[in-house]
Image (cartoon, rainbow, N blue to C red):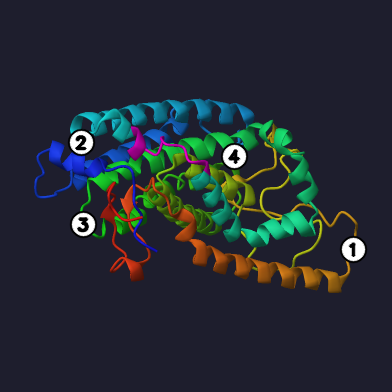
Amino acid sequence: MAPTSSVLNPFTNAYSGLGHEHGLPALSTSFAVILAIIYTLTYVLPFYLSPTTRPSPALSRDAPSVIRARIRAVSLSCLICATTTLLVLLAWASLSPLEAVRLLGWFPISPTDITKTATLTALLFAGPLFERGVVEGEWRNWIRGARVAETLGSWIGWRNFVAGPITEELLFRSLLTPLALLSHHGPAAAATVTLTTPLYFGIAHVHHFYEYTLTHPHTPLLPALLRSLVQFAYTSLFGFYATFVFLRTGSLPAAILAHAFCNWCGLPRLWGRVEPGVPIGPPDIGSRRKRDGEDVRGAVGAVGQFRVGPPAGGETDEGEDIAWTVAYYIILVGGAAAFYECLWALTESGNALVAFGPPALTGGGGGGLASPDSGA
């Protein structure tokens, strides 16, 4: 596979426009880091500045009133940060408006890139899809789209699958990644950006530790801390994947779809027996539960997974459970292997922000800046 080509070459213009005739970065690393920190704080701090967005022992973050207020807050934060980034790209990095929106992943919108990203993400979650679709029989509802309106009709569903993915990918991928790219130069730029910028995304979820201790005051500190560390780990891991996809496809919609899909699937089951009627991942959004005096619908999105109830049909045959379990883990491992094999092929795009490919084919895995005349 040849290095990815692109119709966009904003970096060359940025360097020449700023007088960096020796190919130096258009932005300083410290400037990009400071903006990234400010953006992260701008996204998270409003959650605690107002009683309408701040959780308490009597008010869960899943309360509809809190969700609505937080969606308004992060929407305003994203608007402010997007305006700032556009000004930096246009005035400081000397990009044209078209180059700027392309670098942000807003244009062009490629249905092919979006479809390939969805396919790649589905391979990674082949095991959970098998369990929910086949073992639990949800495939019929998927075909009919029976639960879509019910899921998105709840504020938790709207947060987990629409507002959250859009605002988080806009800020942590579309706005932070271009600034990081313009502050790095050389063959290792792509790898550096892919491995560093997702850490801001992981850090932005650490505040859930405080919220969890508020709403679960009787939980010992160590388990709560371990829960937060695990959350930081898997949100950062997803950030690595989403940033990789964003760099390779130049598509913000592709990253948003991958995010929503991962939120819907939850964490894959890595141990335990697979039993019909015992779901993993986000439970049914329409299953209402009362907690802390609020009408809360059980869904956890990217936060994790939990089981609900016994199998619908009562006791199940042990041999059947073992067969389902063996099949699940075979499909889980097979899907992960297919994901690894298809990672580069399914993210190949002419809209890539940087030209880089598999290490064996690009002389060490570095990323050169994409050029319109680079080989396809």
Mark 3 and mark 4 lie on one chain; the one further toward the N terminus is 4
Task: State if disc 4 and disc 1 touch (CB < 8 Å).
Answer: no
- On residue 93, the disc is 2
- The residue at which mark 1 appears reads as 315
Q: CA distance from mark 2 to mark 4?
A: 34 Å
Q: Judge from the rendering whether residue 233 lies leftward or rightward of residue 101; answer left or right.
A: right
Q: Which residues are magenta?
A: 101-111
Residue under the image location 77 percent in, 68 percent down: 324
Secondary structure of the residue carrying tag 1 is loop
Instruction: Bin the neighbour count of mark 2 within 10 Å (Cα to Cα): few under 14, some 14-19, many 20 and up.
Output: many
What's the CA distance linking mark 3 and mark 4?
A: 37 Å
Whether residue 122 appears in magenta in the rendering, the answer is: no
In contact (CB < 8 Å): disc 3 and disc 4: no
Residue at the image point whose x is 90% and y is 56% from the top: 313
In space, the residues marked 1 and 2 are separated at their CA atoms by 65 Å
Q: Amino acid at mark 4?
A: Phe
- In the image, 70 versus 94, the foreground residue is 94
Amino acid type, residue under disc 2 in the picture: Ala
Number of numbered discs overlaid on the protein picture: 4
Instruction: List x then y, in percent, for residue 89.
Output: 25, 34
**Which quarter of the image is occupied by the C terminus?**
bottom left
**Secondary element at tag 3:** loop
Q: Nearer the viewer, residue 294 or 314?
A: 314
Task: Please tell me the numbered disc located at residue 186.
Answer: 3
Q: Kindly state the secondary structure of the residue where label 4 is placed.
A: helix
Q: Is residue 52 above or below residue 1?
A: above
Q: Amino acid at mark 1?
A: Glu
